[in-house]
Image (cartoon, rainbow, N blue to C red):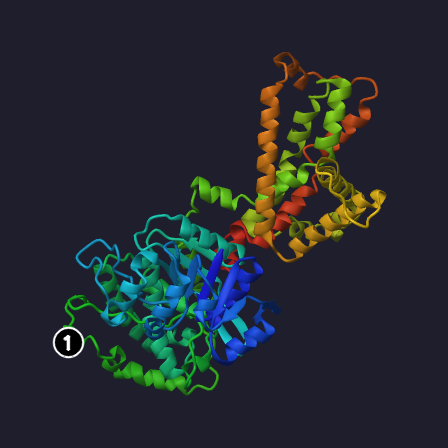
Amino acid sequence: MRICIYGAGAIGGWLGVQLSLAGEDVTLIARGPHLEAMQKNGLKLLIDGEERVAHPRCVADPAEAGIQDYVIVTLKAHSFPGVVDPMQLLMDEDTAVVTGVNGIPWWYFYKLEGEYENHQLESIDSGGRIWDSIGPQRAIGCVVYPAAEIVEPGVIRHIKGDRFILGEPDGKPSDRSQKLCDALINAGFTSRVRNNIRDDIWVKLWGNLCFNPISALTHATLDLVAGEPETSEVCRLMMVEAQAIGEKLGAKFRVDVDRRLAGGAAVGTAQNFDAAGPGARPTDGNRRSGHRHPGIGAPGRDPDADNRCCIGAYPAAWARCWYLSKRAKPKNRMTAETEKESAEQYFENLELPSMTPGSLLRKFGPGIMLMMTGIGTSHLVTAPVAGGRYGYALLWCLPIAYIFKYYGFEMAIRFTHATGRSILDAYATAWKKLPVWYVLITTVIQSAVGQAGRLIAAAAVVFYFFRLYLGLDIPGIDDDRELAVYALVIGILSVAIILRGRYAVVELATKIAAGILIVCTFAVYVVQPAPVSEFVHFFKLDMPEGSWLIIASFLGLLPTGIDVSLQASEWGKAKRVGMGTLAGKNGAGGACQ
């Protein structure tokens, strides 16, 4: 997909690095020294103790970027109107615009059923310029939870979080939202599509509207702002008023005030104090403030007080804020209980994944890798030989091999989905780590023998297609070495794809190959079906003379070696399937360890 990130600051740049490394066609639009550094050296991301460098297209002029499938806008709200005209160069009729900042977006009332449907927010979109030029039909909502910062031009440091929530304004499922969600997940983020993105907008804004100003004014971290009795009471009063406004607009708050406060406290000292300093920029996407529509307010509240500072009404709490700001080393008050409550809140917000056929096909990755990796000599060589020599006499080997190996195949991938870890992590807990040593030894042997055989078999197919079928050969290569060259090229390409983490590329290729193989298999069976009378050999244990070697091969390699389940488990762990998407939450929430 062609994805443009307009405003490649901390969050936008982080998105750009991950999406680019995952194989997406990414363009970053930036300016100044940051742009110059990215153009010269690429964009460096500091995350999880490592450095990742990507080289996406980096430009200042949208005209150089071309038409995009998605434009993710991570600019501050007041900067958006100024880029409306240049953005036209990035869009055709199918381009989607993602509002990648938090707060009430300019399209908020688009297709919102009720008296305010299609109302335009003058404070955000003066004169309706964004609404009329971009069009709310392009909008995809996005709630940004992570925090990051620009350390220096061209260098971004990830601080905390990886969750991006998406949703259509009308709440209906769409291919464009799901494809973007899948791309984010493939790039290593946690993402999902909600059926009411406005609820998530309010839950995030709910904390921002009280935590951010108090923290900025006092330089106190959220564990203190949400944990001290006086300041937490100020937050509570502000949140109760905001909840009344949100609910009047139809928003549903899935958590109560206390749990939202606990969630803020769980952030602890992860905030960047510098964000409150002169000229500093926020680092977590919280760059937008909404507009209160006349007549929308908390019950019993004076409508003329809309612009008053809530804190000003509570001098005792304000004094307490001042006292907190003078503490040289604020202590972390986050306890195990508040951490657990924060995790519980996270789990309460989870929704079941989409079960539509298209979504299931896109998520069908580790399983199909297991299936395609298992297709080898036992299927393509041994089975035809057995059929040619002994007819249907050895059919009984198939159900026995599948039944006895089924649990082994299921165990590994189920363990990864349930825990987010590889089955090798479980093997490492055994005495002296003997299973791990066994896997290491067998893997080395299979790499030297098995993989070499697979490469030769794959190269033979390619050699036959190009040399014998199309009549093409490799110039300057002897005939007896041409097969080895094909094998070397296939091996290098395969290793390069895996080392680059191009999971989507590999899975797409295997889906195509698997589809062709399945269609061809069914086609052959339709043309030349097996006689029904021969099905009795599924239950009849025949051992024709000289068949013992093929039987051993069938039982050992059909449907494939049990080691392939380890590969599928590692693949699933790298993609963060299942509970892997909840890394850092399952321990506190009491989920699978």
**Near-viewer residue (60 or 9):** 60
Element carrying mark 1? helix
Residue drawn at point x = 47 percent, y = 73 percent = 60
Q: Is residue 127 above or below residue 536?
A: below
Q: Quadrant of residue 322?
A: bottom left
**Numbered circles on residues, count:** 1
Q: Is residue 7 above or below residue 511?
A: below
**Near-viewer residue (145 or 481):** 481
**Near-viewer residue (33 or 341):** 33
User: Taking 319 as reference, is 480 left or right?
Assistant: right
Residue 370 at x, y = what percent?
A: 63, 41
User: Taking 452 as reference, is 59 left or right?
Assistant: left
**Near-viewer residue (411 or 589):** 411
Residue 287 at x, y = what percent?
A: 37, 72
User: Taking 527 as reference, is 313 left or right?
Assistant: left
Residue 151 at x, y = what percent?
A: 53, 78
Task: Decide if residue 253 is in sight here.
Answer: no
**In the rendered structure, which amino acid carries the disc numbered 1?**
Asp
Q: Quadrant of residue 395?
A: top right
Q: Which residue is mark 1?
A: 304
Residue 72 at x, y = what percent?
A: 42, 63
